Image: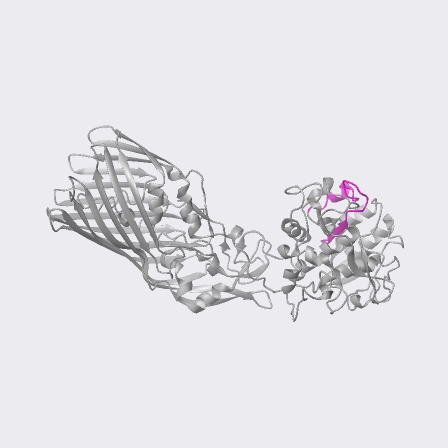
C-alpha cells in the first residue's frame, strides 16, 4: 500500500514560540471591556497572536491628518518627525488619531487596545480637515517616511487623487523595503482608487484594504478588489471604536476603508515584531495566504484574498524544517515526513527525557519563523513487519495472471491487479496522520521469468514482486506460501519497498544439496526517496527425506532508511549497511505433520544524516524468528493446514544520540538537548497465523486464514489486530 506522510497539511502547531526578545508579562483579557469595545479584534482573530508578539520594536508611519498626541491611548506611542521640535497634531477632526489608535492604542485597562499595542507611530500630517491630500503633499510625506530607517510599514488612509509625483513616491518607498498598506477607497466602485500603474508594481510589497461590516460582508461604500484582487484583502471597517480628537480621553466610531487599513498594518507589525528579518514581500505573502476566504472560492474580484486572520498569519506556513537560514547551529533537516518503523520508532517512548524533548521541539516554517511543536504526536509509527498490510494487499484486490510456458524449461508469468476501496479503510482508521494514495500503484503490474535446466541450474528474474519471492525457496525448504509471514520473512533484510527488481541463480547439486545466489534492488515510493540493494547467498541441505536445514547470508545496503523503516525527515539516516545470517530448519515428525523454525540475526552500521535528530549510532543489532507446524492430507486428499507464531524484525540492541533543537539564544543560535537513548523496545510484536486449504476440484481451491497481531503499545499506534479471510482460487 502506498502511503504518504502529510505532516505539513495535517499537523497543527501546538504552541507558538516567543523568540522576538519580548517579555510578555500579561496579555489582554478577551472578556475585558477594553477588548469587547472592538468587535474588529475578534473578527481578525488577533488574540492567539498576542501570546507571542505585541508589535514591540516596529514603527508604523501613519500618513493622514496627524495624531492627537495628548490622548492617553497614544502615551509613549509617538515618534516625532524631526527629533521632537515638530509634532504633526491632528487637525482633521480626529481621523488620523483614530487610524493610529487602531494600530497602536495601549494595553492599559481602559478604552481600547491596538492590534499591535506595543508598536509605535510616526504621524505625518499630509491631509487637510476634509481628510484630503494633494499629490505633492502626499508625495512629500511618503518620501519622508521612506527615508527613515526605523519605519517598516507605511499606511495611506487619506482621500486623494493618485497622480505624479505621489505614484512615484509609493513605488520608491516600496523599493526602499517599506510595506505599503493603502485604503481601497469609499466610492462604491468595482476597483480600488489606486491606479493599475501603481499596484501592478507592488510585487508583494503592498496591500490594498477593503472594508467589511459585522456580518463579514463588504460594506456598500467600499471599493471592491476588481482587477487588483491579487493585492487586495479586507478587514473590519464599520463602526470601528477608536480614539477621538475632541479631548484626551474621547472615543468615537468610524466607518470606511480608511479605518479597515490599520487592522492590516497592525497585523503586519505583529509579524515583523516577532520576526524582524522578514521582507515586506514575505509579510504580505503571509497575510494573503492566511486570510479567511470570503465570497467566491479563492481570490475573487470582490474580497480579493479574503478577510485578515492574524492568528493564522502568526501560525506556521508551508513545510516545517529544523533548520534556519538565519540561525547559527542550524540542523539542516526538513520535517516533511516523519514516518518511522521498527526499533527506530521506539526511542521517544522508552526514554522519559527524550519524550519530553520531542514534546517541545524547535522548528521553522518556510519564512524562517521559529515555533515549538510536539513531534511525539506527529510521528507515523509503523511496525517493520508488513504482516496485516500484506493481507489487505493480497486479498482486497483482484489479480489477473497470465502464465506462458515458453518451453519445458522456461516460463513467464504476468500479473495485473486492480484497486479495491476496502484496501484503504484499514490504514485510514489506524492513524489519523496518514493519507493513502488511491491512485493505481506502480506495483500493480508484475512479471517473472524462470528457468529450470537438467544440469541443476536455474534462474529467476522478477519485477515488482515481493522482495522475498526469489529468496526464500530453495528445493523442498519452502515454509509455506499460506503463511503471510513467510512471504516476507525470508527477506527481512532485503528491504520493504514496493518496487522490486531481483535476479537469482540456483544450483541443485543433488537431492540433498542446493545453493542459490540472489541480488535485489528495492525502491520505496513512499515519497521519501529511499532505496536498498541486497545480495544473498543461501545453501540448503536435506540429510534425510524427513529433515532439511538452510543457511542464508544477506548483505543489505539501504539509502535513506534503516532496517526497512521509512526513517525520514528529522529522523532520517544517510545510509545503513546490514550483514545478517539466518538459519531455517524443517523436520517431519509424523506422516502428515512437519515442524519448522527459523531465526535471523543481523548487525548494522549506520551513517547518520547531517543534521538528523539521531546521531552516533552504536551496537545496532536486530533479529527475527518464527516457528510452527504444517500438516497435509488431514481431512481429505492433498489438503493443507498450519499454525505459526513469529516475531518480525526488531532491534534487539543499539543506542543513538537524540539531538533535539529546543530554543534560540540571544544571538539567535539554536540550542539543542542531546540524550543517549536505546533503540531497543521492551516488548516484541507477536504474530499468530493459522490456515486451512483444500481442493474442491482440479480447477478450484478453497482457503481460510486467521491472523492475529499482538503489538506492544510502546512500538506502534496501530495496536493489536485480527484478520479473518477466505479465498477461492480457480484455474481456467
Image vertical order of residue 136 relative to residue 78, above or below: above
Q: Nearer the viewer, residue 586 or 244?
A: 244
Image vertical order of residue 255 relative to residue 23, above or below: above
Image coordinates of residue 470 in percent, x first then y, are: 26, 42
Q: Nearer the viewer, residue 23 or 708?
A: 708
Q: Which residue: 57% across, 57% down?
A: 325
Q: Main secondary structure of the magenta part?
A: loop
What segment is highlighted magenta in the picture?
A: 175-203
Number of numbered labels in the structure image: 0
Image coordinates of residue 490 in percent, x first then y, are: 26, 49
Image coordinates of residue 100 in percent, x first then y, are: 78, 60
Q: Is residue 32 visible?
A: yes
Q: Is residue 149 visible?
A: no
Q: Quadrant of residue 67?
A: bottom right
Residue 194 magenta-highlighted: yes
Q: Nearer the viewer, residue 544 or 559?
A: 544
The answer to whether 170 appears left or right of 42 in the picture is right
Q: Which residue: 77% across, 68% down?
A: 76
The answer to whether 76 appears left or right of 520 in the picture is right
Amino acid at each position: 500500500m502506498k502511503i504518504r506522510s502529510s505532516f505539513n497539511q495535517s499537523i497543527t502547531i501546538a504552541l507558538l514560540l516567543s523568540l522576538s526578545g519580548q517579555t510578555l508579562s500579561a496579555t489582554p483579557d478577551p472578556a475585558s471591556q477594553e477588548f469587547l469595545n472592538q468587535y474588529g479584534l475578534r473578527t481578525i482573530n488577533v488574540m492567539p497572536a498576542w501570546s507571542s508578539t505585541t508589535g514591540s520594536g516596529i514603527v508604523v508611519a501613519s500618513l493622514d491628518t496627524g495624531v492627537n498626541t495628548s490622548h492617553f491611548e497614544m502615551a509613549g506611542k509617538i515618534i516625532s518627525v524631526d527629533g521632537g521640535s515638530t509634532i504633526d497634531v491632528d487637525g482633521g477632526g480626529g481621523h488620523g488619531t483614530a487610524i493610529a489608535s487602531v494600530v497602536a492604542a495601549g494595553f492599559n485597562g481602559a478604552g481600547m487596545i491596538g492590534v499591535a499595542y506595543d508598536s509605535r507611530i510616526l504621524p505625518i500630517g499630509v491631509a487637510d480637515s476634509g481628510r484630503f491630500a494633494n499629490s505633492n503633499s502626499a508625495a512629500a510625506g511618503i518620501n519622508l517616511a521612506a527615508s527613515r530607517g526605523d519605519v517598516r510599514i507605511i499606511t495611506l488612509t487619506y482621500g486623494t487623487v493618485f497622480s505624479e509625483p505621489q505614484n512615484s513616491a509609493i513605488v520608491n518607498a516600496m523599493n526602499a523595503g517599506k510595506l505599503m498598506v493603502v485604503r481601497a477607497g469609499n466610492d462604491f466602485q468595482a476597483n480600488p482608487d489606486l491606479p493599475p500603474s501603481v499596484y501592478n508594481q507592488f510585487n508583494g510589497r503592498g496591500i490594498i484594504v477593503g472594508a467589511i461590516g459585522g456580518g463579514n460582508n463588504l460594506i456598500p461604500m467600499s471599493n471592491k478588489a476588481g482587477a487588483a484582487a491579487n493585492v487586495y484583502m479586507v478587514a473590519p471597517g464599520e463602526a470601528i471604536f477608536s480614539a477621538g480628537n475632541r479631548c484626551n480621553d474621547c472615543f468615537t466610531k468610524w466607518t470606511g476603508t480608511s479605518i479597515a487599513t490599520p487592522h492590516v498594518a497592525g497585523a503586519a507589525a505583529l509579524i515583523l515584531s516577532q520576526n524582524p528579518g522578514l521582507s515586506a514581500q514575505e509579510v504580505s505573502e503571509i497575510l494573503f495566504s492566511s486570510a479567511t476566504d470570503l465570497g467566491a472560492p479563492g481570490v475573487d474580484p470582490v474580497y480579493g484574498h479574503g478577510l485578515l486572520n492574524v492568528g493564522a498569519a502568526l501560525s506556521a506556513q508551508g513545510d516545517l524544517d529544523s533548520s534556519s537560514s538565519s540561525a547559527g547551529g542550524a540542523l539542516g533537516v526538513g520535517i516533511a515526513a516523519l514516518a518511522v518503523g521498527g526499533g527506530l520508532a521506539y526511542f521517544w517512548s522508552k526514554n522519559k527525557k527524550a519524550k519530553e524533548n520531542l514534546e517541545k521541539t524547535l522548528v521553522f516554517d518556510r519564512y524562517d519563523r521559529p515555533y515549538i511543536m510536539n513531534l511525539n504526536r506527529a510521528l507515523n509509527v509503523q511496525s517493520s513487519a508488513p504482516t496485516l498490510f500484506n493481507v489487505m494487499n493480497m486479498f482486497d484486490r483482484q489479480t489477473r495472471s497470465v502464465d506462458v510456458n515458453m518451453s519445458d524449461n522456461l516460463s513467464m508469468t504476468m500479473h495485473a491487479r486492480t484497486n479495491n476501496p476496502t484496501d484503504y479503510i484499514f490504514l485510514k482508521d489506524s492513524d489519523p496522520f496518514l493519507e493513502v494514495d488511491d491512485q493505481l500503484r506502480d506495483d500493480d503490474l508484475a512479471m517473472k521469468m524462470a528457468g529450470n535446466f537438467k544440469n541443476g541450474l536455474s534462474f529467476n528474474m522478477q519485477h515488482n514482486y515481493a522482495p522475498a519471492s526469489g529468496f526464500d525457496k530453495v528445493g523442498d525448504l519452502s515454509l509455506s506460501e499460506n503463511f503471510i509471514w513467510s512471504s516476507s520473512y525470508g527477506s527481512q533484510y532485503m528491504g520493504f519497498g514496493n518496487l522490486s527488481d531481483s535476479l537469482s541463480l540456483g544450483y541443485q547439486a543433488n537431492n540433498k544439496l542446493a545453493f542459490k545466489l540472489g541480488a535485489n534492488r528495492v525502491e520505496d515510493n513512499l515519497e521519501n526517496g529511499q532505496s536498498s540493494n541486497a545480495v544473498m547467498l543461501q545453501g540448503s541441505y536435506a540429510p534425510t527425506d524427513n529433515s532439511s536445514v538452510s543457511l542464508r547470508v544477506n548483505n543489505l545496503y539501504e539509502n535513506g532508511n534503516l532496517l526497512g523503516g521509512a526513517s525520514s525527515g528529522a529522523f532520517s539516516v544517510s545510509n545503513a549497511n546490514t550483514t545478517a545470517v539466518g538459519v531455517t530448519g524443517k523436520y517431519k515428525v509424523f506422516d502428515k505433520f512437519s515442524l519448522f523454525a527459523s531465526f535471523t540475526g543481523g548487525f548494522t552500521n549506520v551513517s547518520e544524516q547531517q543534521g538528523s535528530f539521531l546521531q552516533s549510532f552504536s551496537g545496532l543489532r536486530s533479529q527475527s524468528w518464527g516457528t510452527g507446524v504444517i500438516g497435509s492430507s488431514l481431512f481429505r486428499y492433498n489438503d493443507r493446514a498450519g499454525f505459526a507464531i513469529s516475531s518480525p524484525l526488531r532491534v534487539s540492541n543499539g543506542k543513538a544520540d537524540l539531538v533535539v533543537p529546543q530554543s534560540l539564544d540571544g544571538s539567535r543560535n539554536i540550542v539543542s538537548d542531546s540524550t543517549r537513548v536505546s533503540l531497543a523496545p521492551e516488548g516484541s510484536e507477536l504474530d499468530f497465523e493459522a490456515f486451512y486449504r483444500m481442493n474442491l476440484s482440479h480447477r478450484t481451491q478453497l482457503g481460510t486464514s486467521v491472523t492475529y497481531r499482538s503489538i506492544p503499545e510502546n512500538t506502534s499506534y496501530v495496536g493489536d489486530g485480527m484478520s479473518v479471510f477466505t479465498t477461492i482460487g480457480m484455474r481456467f
